[in-house]
Amino acid sequence: MKRFTLISLLVLFATMGFAQRNIDFSQLKRMPVKQNIFKNVQMLDRSAATSTQRKAPRKAAELVTPPSGKETEQWYIFDGGFYVSYQGETIDVAELFENIGVIIDGNDIYLQGLALYFKDAWVKGTIDGSTVTIPTGQFLGSDSDGDEYLVGYDMSKKAFCDIKFAYDSEKGLLTLDPNIAMLENGKQSELAIWGYWMGLTLSQKAPELVTPPAGEEEDWVVGGVELTYDEEKQTMVPGEAEEYPVKVIIDGSDFYVQGLSNIFPEAWVKGTIADGKVTFATGQYLGVYSETDEESGETLDFNMFLVGLSTESAENTESTGSPEIVDLVYTYDEENQTLTNETTLMVISVKPTSVRTYLQIYCPVVIYKPVDDGISTINSKKEANVFYNLQGVKMAKPTQKGLYIVNGKKVVVK
């Protein structure tokens, strides 16, 4: 079974301590986020919570109650991270959140599901043009670990504040102010952090699959290598070169591929042909991936997206601290019906604009339409043929079936 891995390509913050409740996050294999936004703050840890960490809950404050008779819309978490402490590491668990319930009643807006430990709790805000304001300090609930509140914290001012979202009613988007951390906090006006949101964007519209036009589907092949994370060496390690079949439809300047990710063989992605290149826009939706925990039997569903990652950025992550999300761009040899790519990794990610948590990283070196006659296109003259494998290693002759570079051309050896 494949396991998700949190790739800490995004260095966001300076060292921070969390609190953590007794929830097991181990089913999602991750690397820790190296830096965090709160300096010298011991964040609460529910996996290690003791009676000395939190006092017994006080008399319950009043919970927000949404208006009756109003339909709750389900908005989708388009982007953002929710950070908690787990066994001494800071991890992003945003994919554990389901949809966010939203009710808009005139200028009032109600949101449900922003808290990890009190997912039924509502908070209330007001709409003023293109801004939504949620007053800080709203009560979320109480349990054996104490009270919880939704609290805003202005990172630039290092002060508590109301929570601000940019609101685009036409596109149906709510985007958290990038300077504000939205805390799931143990106190109203003092840092006692169980977890926090950063970069949160909610979308009213569900992600949509690419629909190809009616047309002839051609049989093509993808050749490349999958990369896996070596925890001991803390680096990405390439696997063996492999190939798998895909379907292609070329419709004018549009280039459609079905099965570019072999995890989603039915999903189509769309590219655009221009200036000798085919560009696949990053962030295309692939479908739902289900993960079942072997011990608990609980099944979680994750929306997955095709995201491009610059190879140079990935190699220099340790120094730059931030990955470069890019479109997937291939050089297009129309005559030989071949696409080649040396600068972009294909990441199957739970977010369309981030690679922090991913299912697969793949280096699709080439997409090509195979010839039917095996190696019959190899030089028919007396000169010796020159063979290279996909790793660029010169060979006397092919040792197994697959794609090779023969006399400067891509040839399938069957």
Image (cartoon, rainbow, N blue to C red):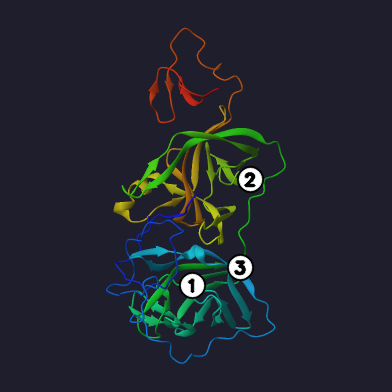
Q: Residue 388, image x and y in percent?
A: 42, 24
Q: Is residue 353 in sight in this rendering?
A: yes
Q: From the viewer's perspective, is the residue at label 1 or at label 3 nearer? A: 1
Left or right: 341 in relation to 75: left
Identity, as a three-letter code, of the amino acid under mark 2? Glu
Mark 1 or 2, nearer chain start: 1
Q: Which residue is mark 3?
A: 204
Number of residues whose C-alpha sits closer than 10 Å to that of mark 2, classed few (under 14), some (14–19) or many (20 or more): some
Image height of 208 relative to 139, above or below: above
The residue wearing badge 1 is 116
Count the marks. Answer: 3
The relative height of residue 220 versus residue 141 in the rendered view (above or below) is above
Task: Residue at 36% x, 81% y: name it.
Answer: 51
Residue 137: give x, y in percent of width and height.
Answer: 44, 85
Q: Residue at x 49, y 45 (%)?
A: 328
Q: Which residue is mark 2?
A: 266
